[in-house]
Amino acid sequence: MADIYLDNNATTRVDDAVVAAMLPFFTEQYGNPSSMHGFGDKVGRALKLARAQVQSLLGAAHDSEIVFTSCGTESNSTAILSALKSFPDRREIITTTVEHPAVLTLCQHLEQNEGYTVHYLAVDRQGRLDLDTYRALLSPRVAVVSVMWANNETGTLFPVREMAEMAHAADVLFHTDAVQAVGKIPLDLKSTAIDMLSLSGHKLHAAKGVGVLYLRRGVRYRPLLRGGHQERGRRAGTENAAGIVGLGVAAELALHYMEYENAAVRRLRDTLEQGIIAQVPSCFVTGDPHNRLPNTANIAFEYIEGEAILLLLNKAGIAASSGSACTSGSLEPSHVMRAMDIPYTAAHGTVRFSFSRYNTAEEVARVIEAVPPVVAQLRKLSPYWDGKTNAPVRDPQQAFAPSYA
Ligand SMILES: *Cc1c(COP(=O)(O)O)cnc(C)c1O
């Protein structure tokens, strides 16, 4: 039996059509797109097509608003640092407590080492933001707002369209890390007030090492990388031609598969959630039940460790994740679970199953079969679980001493 991959929020399989489109750019079409000869010309035309394909997926007004970068992380850093350089007198940043480390770590650095004031918007138990708190923080002191479109751990969607409108009304730049949203939900940027957006190729069936920064026409901008005139001087460095061409094809496929993903992938995800919840006591789905990506299921299995579940699932040929790949390896529950104030006894036992169009109903059936015995086996070892009653021991929250400081 083939292994089952349910970790598509960490990275995705490169689509065969994407690989096929990339290959010639390693062999026959190796020209530098900036060169003034036929070799360069051909590659330049391929990049132009890819730019149009990404423009379509994003619903951007102009293809010149698409800047190719090396990854989602670079796009996020470029956007935030550009805003700070463009408005040197503005010393505040607004973001959230549940951003990807690609935004959070940068903000913490700016706060600790560069003297910026960073406002981290809190979330409730369901991972939702309070827009009144947000509105109150918007002021001429704020250089940029950076709020993710979809959360990588829970799939929770933030109301970024509305938040961008509010930022604009206050004359503040708005950036969104849309790495998890792009390709999974319709975007149509031209009908929004979003100024900057980040996406990453490897999260939507393109290769690792290519990303995009969307820059609304007319937005103030200062490049991170200076050098050659690539990307109209907005991102110097010879373009990753193969990666970009592949991303263009991936964007076209994403647009094509969007409806399928919304329906079929959601059905697989929901079947998995319902199947597990029906059979496993003391577990629940985290995140906003009403505004969520169709592909993400984050389930908290109380009184056991997510890492232990993953290990046993891995033995059964099932690949999932606990927290984000970037935070796993530490014993603390992820910052997203802590921000949602998920009880300590549950936050440690979260497992993220993230789907793609490559997953099948047979795979979901196998996972639904595999999970309950794994959880039962681990709970046998848990001091907080009573095997006789098949329920938690009395007052496990008390027994499980530490809680977050
Ligand atoms: C994966 C991810 C990133 C980082 O993208 P890279 O291309 O790997 O740098 C940023 N934000 C979110 C929400 C992600 O899921």
Image (cartoon, rainbow, N blue to C red):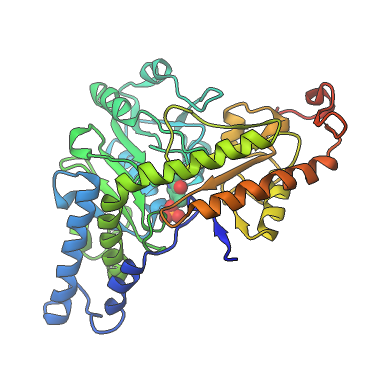
- Label count reads 0
The one nearer the camera, 316 or 9, is 316
Give left or right: position of 37 versus 223: left
* Residue at (25, 54) in percent of width and height: 67
The one nearer the camera, 63 or 202, is 202
Give left or right: position of 182 versus 60: right
Q: Is residue 10 above or below residue 382?
A: below
- For the N terminus, which image quadrant? bottom right
> Residue 105 location, x and y as percent?
51, 43
Q: Is residue 390 above or below residue 153?
A: above
- For the C terminus, which image quadrant? top right
> Residue 114 location, x and y as percent?
46, 39
Q: Residue furthest bottom?
A: 28
* Residue at (36, 42) in percent of width and height: 262
The one nearer the camera, 224 or 94, is 94
* Residue at (70, 43) in percent of width and height: 372
Q: Quadrant of residue 188?
A: top left
Regarding residue 6, the answer to whether it shows in the image is no
Give left or right: position of 79 versus 361: left
* Residue at (27, 40) in percent of width and height: 187
Regarding residue 146, the answer to whether it shows in the image is yes
> Residue 124 location, x and y as percent?
53, 22
> Residue 79 location, x and y as percent?
33, 44
Q: Is residue 81 above or below residue 20?
A: above
